[in-house]
Image (cartoon, grey):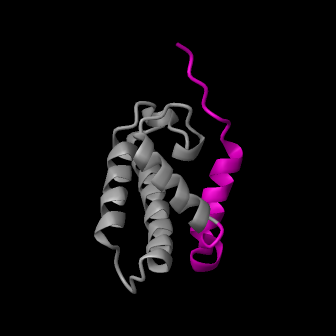
Amino acid sequence: MKKDKLKARNDREKNTFYAMMSIYCSSHHGRGKGLCSECKSLLSYIYIKIDLCVFKNKKPKCIKCALNCFNREMRSKMEEVIKFSQYRLIFKHPLLAASYFLEIAMQPVRKINF
């Protein structure tokens, strides 16, 4: 995968996480626009992990990855956000949701061989 495609893919994944985080934050933290500080810090943590992924051009979706690069607390928060927001994403951002679900369906679970 070329650098441009990798950047576009990472940007799309970041946009998806931002959309999910917005849905979650507005429902759980009562924010009208923008994210609360807790959600902003989780989102920036996710962005860093996406940019520093060890798989680079063969990067799976974080939710399907067998390598736990997220610490436990952040991973559980991320999973909570995804579980709450992924189906609500269909109504708020249908094209982004279609892309997200299509990529998840097409990717096998990443296995790590040591």
Q: Residue 114 location in percent, x, y?
A: 52, 13
Q: Is residue 6 visible?
A: no
Q: Residue 26 location in percent, x, y?
A: 45, 79
* Residue positioned 65% across, 64% down in the render: 98
Quadrant in the picture for residue 101? bottom right
> Which of 43/100 is in front?
43
Q: Residue 73 location in percent, x, y?
A: 42, 47
Q: Residue 91 location in percent, x, y?
A: 64, 78
Q: Please identify the dominant SS of the magenta region.
A: helix
Q: Is 69 left or right of 92, judged from the image as shown?
A: left
**Which residue is the extreme one toward the top?**
114
Q: Is residue 28 visible?
A: yes
Is residue 96 magenta-colored?
A: yes
Number of numbered labels in the structure image = 0
User: Is the residue 55 above or below the residue 19 in the image?
Assistant: above
**Which residue is the extreme one toward the bottom?**
32
Q: Is 108 left or right of 61, judged from the image as shown?
A: right
* Residue positioned 32% across, 47% down in the render: 48
* Residue positioned 34% across, 78% down in the render: 34
Is residue 99 magenta-colored?
A: yes
**Which residue is the extreme one toward the right?**
105
* Residue positioned 71% across, 48% down in the render: 105
Specify start and end residues of the magenta stretch as a single range: 87-114
> Which of 104/2 is in front?
104
User: Is the residue 88 above or below the residue 64 in the image?
Assistant: below
